[in-house]
Amino acid sequence: MPVYGVPGGLVRATPTGDDLNTVDDPPEGGQSAAAKDAGDSRLDSLGRYAPLIVGAVAFAAYLRTLMPGIAFGDWGEMQTVPHILGISHPTGYPTYILLAWLTELVPIGSVAFRANLLSAVLVSGALALATAISVRLGVRPIIAIAAGIATGAVGTVWAAATVAEVNPLHLFFAAALLHRALVWEERRRFRDLVIGGLLVGLSLGNHLLTVFIAPFVALFVLWVGRREIIARPWILPAAAGATVLGLMVYLYIPIAASRSPSLAYNHPVTLDAVWWLVSGTQFRGQFDFLSAAGPGRFIDSLPSLWNLLVSRGTPVLPILGFGGLAVLLWRRPAFALMSLAILVLGLYVWANYLELEHYLLVPWLILGIAAAVALDAIADGVAAAMSMAGRSAAANVGFGVGGVGLVLALLLGLTNWSAADRSRDLSGSDYVNAVLTALPENAAILSEWDASTPLWHGQQVLGLRPDVVVVDDSNIVYEGWVTRERRIESLICNRPVFMIRLSDRDLVPTEQEFKVTPFLTVRVAFGGPSAVAAREVVQVEPLDPNTCGGSG
């Protein structure tokens, strides 16, 4: 087998076909000869520290651009619910809730800052794992570092790292599963299979998107370890048991509900209510990927998908990523097919579920790893050509290509910095202070999700204005009020009532039954963590001053 010279040692050329998908049976408790050969070539000093370098660089950038305070929408919810050990919106996300609760015990800054900081840690960890995966695939460490940093500079990835949400944990679990699958392929140790099973269970406890990853990882694990599994079939039930153990995190939901926390979405105290929450019944009508129209919607979305990929990562990264998958199909077909299936299905789900950009996090992870492979293949080609020409500089090609990759990563980071920087974003805190300061004593405010969660944070975490009742649209639904107007009727004779709506059309039914007057102008968010537009908080009063038994 030919070798290519690179600084720090010799790297074996990657064999083709099934050789890299079936390694020699390792001795009990040891590692295979193929794994040892691969380890000898990549675990030089730079290879050992490449994941740490990428994680540290990414974390430094994310910390510098981290949102310092309260967010709107789901992001605000995930700053609040873990702190009080409540229950979040479907599917409950118990793994994240418990992890964030532990994180928020660390006395660094505000609770909101700690929740945001967790996202920075998780995304940095996912990038470190992606770099470790690239190195295990035989990529030169300097190139793996460049690809890892470039992936972290993608706008979609960066945005997830600077504010609290469950998706950074999902990205981390996806990277951990891919990494553990590679470790299993090389060493086929029982503990690696059990750890992988536990990761699957915990990942499902965080986000049901794991169902679009875990089956392909499982198929890869079964294929590359088929001889070991046939020899020791009992290891599969053990791994399945570890998965079940991880899934037990869902017991948090009924246990938490039994405590009646102040924020308990849908109050899941019955088995039916728990299932409604964890199965995501509320949102089933919003996705089409299980319908016959799904493939057509996916195809129609491809132009907008490409434009999004280019705007977030420049054309270079996705092109390299798809090229790297082609290289992997030749060099490591089993790993390539697993990665390609996860990538395509991730894009398919994005296209058929509201085109939510954070659903592209795992596809970006796959493209980043594949981009490292593509760059390394380019370095191999250049080095081979230079060697044939008798040029001794071929040994430095890896550093040259890696250097170019680092420059591209730096340019991408500089391009996306201003859009990703949330370090001066105090819009959530400003909104909370403005509303809770202006509302009169014992007021009630009817709101909708994006505008409700920061108010809950102000009350439940900061202890502000416990006298105010915040009524979200979700409360109106699962408390059985049917309409906002019926809820207003129940409050208007006992409390000053106010309302904020993100769409003026939502005020029309209320204006037909009540007197509505402007009260306060605030800036709020529309489907994101930061305020983007000014909206009116209005006061709602009876049309007839005698309705409540007295004059206005």
Image (cartoon, grey):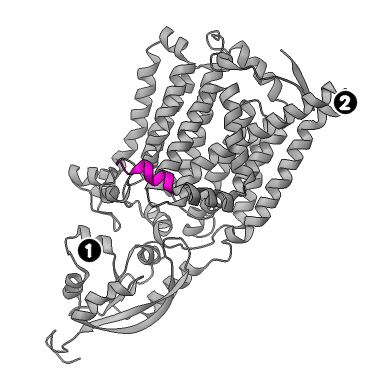
Q: Residue 483 sits in which quadrant?
A: bottom left
Q: Residue 225 lies in magenta, yes or no? A: no
State the residue in front, 448 or 364: 364
Residue 230 pos. (x, y %): 41, 9
Q: Residue 537: which numbered mark, if any?
A: none
For badge 2, the amino acid type reads: Arg
Amino acid type of the residue tagged 1 in the rendering: Ile
Quote the CA–CA distance across marks 2 and 1: 74 Å
Counting other residues with Cα less than 10 Å from the Cα at mark 1, is it few (<14), some (14-19), or many (20 or more)? some
Q: Residue at x 35, y 43 (%)?
A: 294
Considering the image in quadrants, where does the C terminus appear?
bottom left
Q: Is residue 247 left or right of residue 219?
A: left
What residue sits right under mark 1 in the picture?
476
Q: Nearer the viewer, residue 105 or 342?
A: 342
Residue 114, how many percent across, how many down?
A: 50, 54
The reply, left or right, for residue 214 in relation to residue 135 is left
Give me the residue at 57% from left, 22% from top.
332
Q: Quadrant of the N terminus?
A: top right
Front in this rendered view, residue 125 or 178: 178
Question: What residue is shown at x 13% (from left), y 89% (from top)?
Answer: 546
Magenta stretch in the rendered image: 292-300
Q: Label 2 belongs to which residue?
A: 391
Residue 61 appears in the figure: yes
SS for callout 2: loop
